[in-house]
Amino acid sequence: MFKDIIIGQYIPGNSPLHRMNAPIKIILTIFYIIILFFINNPISYLAFALYTFILVLVSKVPLKMILKGIRPMLWIFIFTAVVNLFMTPGETVWSIPIFKFTLNITSEGIIQGAKMLYRLFFLITGTSLLTLTTSPLQLTDGIETLLRPLSKIKVPSHEIAMMMTIAIRFIPTLAEETDKIMKAQTARGADFESGNIIRRAKAMVPLLIPLFVSAFRRADELATAMEARCYRGGMGRTKMKENKAGIIDLKGCTIFVIALLVLILLEILVEF
Amino acid sequence: MIETCNLSFIYRKEDIDTGKVTEELALKDLSIKIEKGSFTAVLGHNGSGKSTLAKHFNAILLPSGGKVYINGMDTLDEKKVFNIRQCAGMVFQNPDNQMVAAMVEDEVAFAPENLGVSPKEIRRRVDECLAAVNMTKYAFCSPSQLSGGQKQRVAIAAVLAMKPDILVLDEPTAMLDPMGRREVMETIKRLNREQGITVVLITHYMDEASQADRTIVMDDGEIVLDGTPKEVFKNVEKLKALGLDVPQVTLLAYELRKSGINIPEDILTEDECFDALNNVLGGASR
């Protein structure tokens, strides 16, 4: 059951988006999100959606994968829409009487709800596009590069990245181990599947305790093995794969800046 | 070259209930010299102190008494710790618990990255070391996709990337299937033969120990037997008393000798056994 676990949701490929430098991609994604929350004009909404759609096409990531990332967020979507619909004060369009209260749907609420849905949708699409085109390893490397300036104010950037790399490395190992322990406990009569939620949570205890004990033992051995290979933190460490920005990153940034300028112009020039 | 002078080591154990500290002498006054370029196997059952000894060669454990010198460097010298670790690389038992990176290639790059080697040189070493253990085509795999033997070969490559003179292997085959054990043993022997790396193999498998140039048998923190595998495995009675087995063919020769058949006592391999039996039986040609 754990054999085909996918770490992150990276889809290998060779599109320009895949080849771009990870730290730059992360920065552009952050800007993408900032812009998403700044635009406030139907025309810019349209332009922004078009820009995103082009990015998805360029990345050659199947649309299905992106929609898959949105599915788990469905409840948040519905919740946001409902809250905005009923809670925004304004001109009442429709009233629903429930016992003593009346729930009012306002026209402002409809607009606000639609805006929030739009933002959530593109927030997820944009970030999925990053994680779909960047391998977890590149991502951690990218985060380390971005955090490096912060090490001056004692942010342990190298340690954070190292921890993430090790976590990624150990997901399959621990998943396999969970599977093994589960089978061993099932063989001894443990029941993980029946009963209500409390019963099932209780049944997890004999699974979690050996798993934790073993994880600690692994951590101890790994630390020894790392020390044996002269690991001494990030100081004086080099990297085999250097994150070097190339022409493709320049192109990517240029396109992004152009898109940004277009959006700003639309915001300023088009009155609505 | 590894040299230990009157090395002793005390494990301190604290009883959780009573808080009483008990001291256990894990190594007792050991003096060994392991020559450059040799292949030494250290044999012993669980708790004989063989792993404790191995951890002294890498300055993971420091002597409670006596000294350990690696290429003339004292392991007690704190300034030399990383030089020693670079000199004497160590491979551990569990292949899963010594891999840091999520990709084989990055795993091999880990040690030289720690040493601050230039990126170009790291690339060169990674390719070279993966080739040395025949794992080049798995460079982009994740460790979870590999078999036990392959993982352990990657672990060896990861240590080789430091360019060590000495390779200390602490029961590298204990968790592997027969196929994996053979792969790892062949890799170790080839590295010793072709690249002249000094190998110290900690093991409890007799057949592995018999492939070395020198076999040291440990029991209860002391050296009981030391010599070429032939010299060591002659002592069938003594090995049995220590709870160790001898290779099957050696045992056969021993039993035959005991029943009065004139057969050499230093038989280690099946071929040697075949020839000896052939001689005894009056030589039908092979």
Image (cartoon, coloured by chain):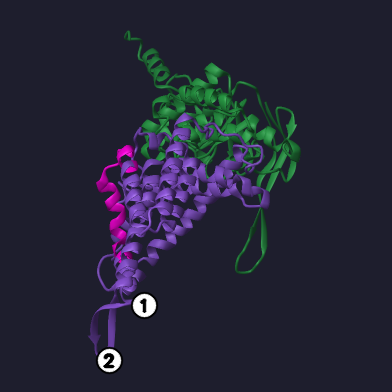
Chain colours: A purple, B green
Name the amino acid, label 1: Pro
Q: Can residue A146 be seen here?
A: yes
CA gap, disc 2 and disc 1:
19 Å
Which is nearer the eye, B134 or B137?
B137
Q: Measured along the vertical axis of the image, is residue B227 above or below residue A214?
A: above
Label 1 Cα crowd, 10 Å radius (few <14 / some 14-19 / many 20+): some
Residue at the disc numbered 1 = A89
Q: Quadrant of residue B31?
A: top right
Label 2 Cα crowd, 10 Å radius (few <14 / some 14-19 / many 20+): few
Which is nearer the eye, B265 or A240?
A240
Q: In this view, does A99 lie to the left or right of B178?
A: left
User: Is B158 colored magenta in this rendering?
Assistant: no
- What's the magenta region? A55-77
* Position in image of residue A219 (x %, y %): 52, 50
Q: Is residue B219 left or right of residue A93?
A: right
Q: Measured along the vertical axis of the image, is residue B129 above or below residue A27?
A: above
Residue at the disc numbered 2 = A100
* Position in image of residue B207 (x %, y %): 45, 29
Q: Residue furthest top?
A: B285
Q: Can residue B266 be seen here?
A: no
Q: Measured along the vertical axis of the image, is residue A95 above or below residue A258?
A: below
Q: Is mark 2 on a helix, strand or loop?
A: loop
Which is nearer the eye, A55 or A5?
A55
How many numbered markers are drawn?
Answer: 2
User: Is A73 colored magenta in this rendering?
Assistant: yes
Q: What element carries label 1?
A: loop
Name the amino acid, label 2: Lys
Label 2 or label 1, whichever lies nearer to me, is 1
Q: Measured along the vertical axis of the image, is residue B279 above or below residue A179?
A: above
Seen at 35% across and 32% down, the residue is: A14
Q: Residue furthest bottom?
A: A100
